[in-house]
Amino acid sequence: MSIVSRGFRGRRQPGAGLIPPGQYIVDGFPVLSAGPTPFTPLEEWDFTIVDETGAVAARWTWDEFRELPAEAPTVDIHCVTKWSKLGTRWEGVSVDTLLDGIETSAEFVIAFADGDYTTNLPLADMRDGQAWVVYGFDGEELEPEHGGPARLLVPHLYFWKSAKWVRGLRLSDDDEPGFWESLGYHNYADPWREQRYWGD
Ligand SMILES: Nc1nc2c(c(=O)[nH]1)N[C@H]1C(S)=C(S)[C@@H](COP(=O)(O)O)O[C@H]1N2
Ligand SMILES: [Mo]
């Protein structure tokens, strides 16, 4: 056991970026879904932010969502099953933009998605350019298997926090474990500290 903090155990790969401990790099884009791919028609799609009182703080239809200012983040993603994919290019709306003007004292978020998938995060991890709701990947529209029409993208945490088919964010005073977090995955999921499972 070295005295170097676990956060510094990432390795620099030849010709690639730094990757977290225990990860390997893939060129393809694996699909990992706990259930079938939902196909919600765009005219039925909306994105909702519910505040900690249960009130709807914001809602956008698909057309309204596509009018919001877009960003094009290029990020590395890290799946708990140990693949990492470097330099992925996305297009979508920053969560900062979605939260703009919403007053809240909530400290936690539960992202909810079609197919009943949920995942929980500290609200602070979704602010300051750390999280997006993306509808484009690699210059194309996001494929249904990868979460289209839109998914969450929170690249600094293991990729299960990036809910596919996301439909909204529920702000909460309490931290409520989501789908995988209830089944033994780590509550916070920092890949640089290898927080894969409960107790890591
Ligand atoms: N709604 C939903 N989102 C999800 C999942 C899922 O099963 N359902 N799987 C998670 C996991 S474990 C990973 S690794 C990534 C996989 O995304 P991909 O299929 O685009 O690679 O989505 C995450 N988001
Ligand atoms: Mo995953």
Image: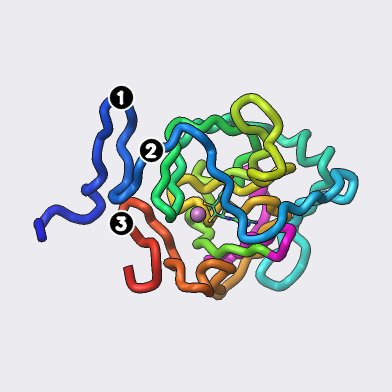
Residue shown at 77% from the left, 35% from the top: 66
Q: How crowded is mark 1: few (under 14 residues within 10 Å), some or many (20 or more)?
A: few
Closest to the camera, between mark 1 and mark 3, is: 1
Q: In this view, does 35 lie to the left or right of 16?
A: right
Closest to the camera, between mark 2 and mark 1, is: 2
Where is residue 156 drawn, in percent x and y? 43, 47
Q: Give the range drawn in magenta.
A: 97-116
Residue type pointed to by label 2:
Ile
Q: Where on the picture, by quarter, is residue 109? A: bottom right
| Location of mark 2 (residue) | 25
* Among numbered discs 2 and 1, the one appearing first in the sequence: 1
**Closer to us: 82 or 2:** 82
Q: Where on the picture, by quarter, is residue 112? A: bottom right
Kind of element beneath mark 1 = loop
* Among numbered discs 1 and 3, the one appearing first in the sequence: 1
The number of numbered discs placed on residues in the rendered structure image is 3
Q: Which mark is residue 193?
A: 3
Whole-angstrom CA distance, mark 2 to mark 3, is 18 Å
Q: Which mark is residue 101?
A: none
Where is residue 105 drawn, in percent x and y? 58, 66
Q: In this view, does 11 lie to the left or right of 133?
A: left
Q: Residues within 10 Å of mark 3 (few under 14, many from 20)?
A: some
Whole-angstrom CA distance, mark 2 to mark 1, is 11 Å
* Among numbered discs 2 and 3, the one appearing first in the sequence: 2
Where is residue 50 drawn, in percent x and y? 72, 63
Kind of element beneath mark 2 = strand
Residue shown at 45% from the left, 50% from the top: 79
Q: Does the magenta stretch include residue 21?
A: no
Q: Does the magenta stretch include residue 113?
A: yes
Whole-angstrom CA distance, mark 1 to mark 3, is 23 Å
Residue shown at 39% from the left, 62% from the top: 196
Q: Is mark 2 within 8 Å of ligand 1?
A: no
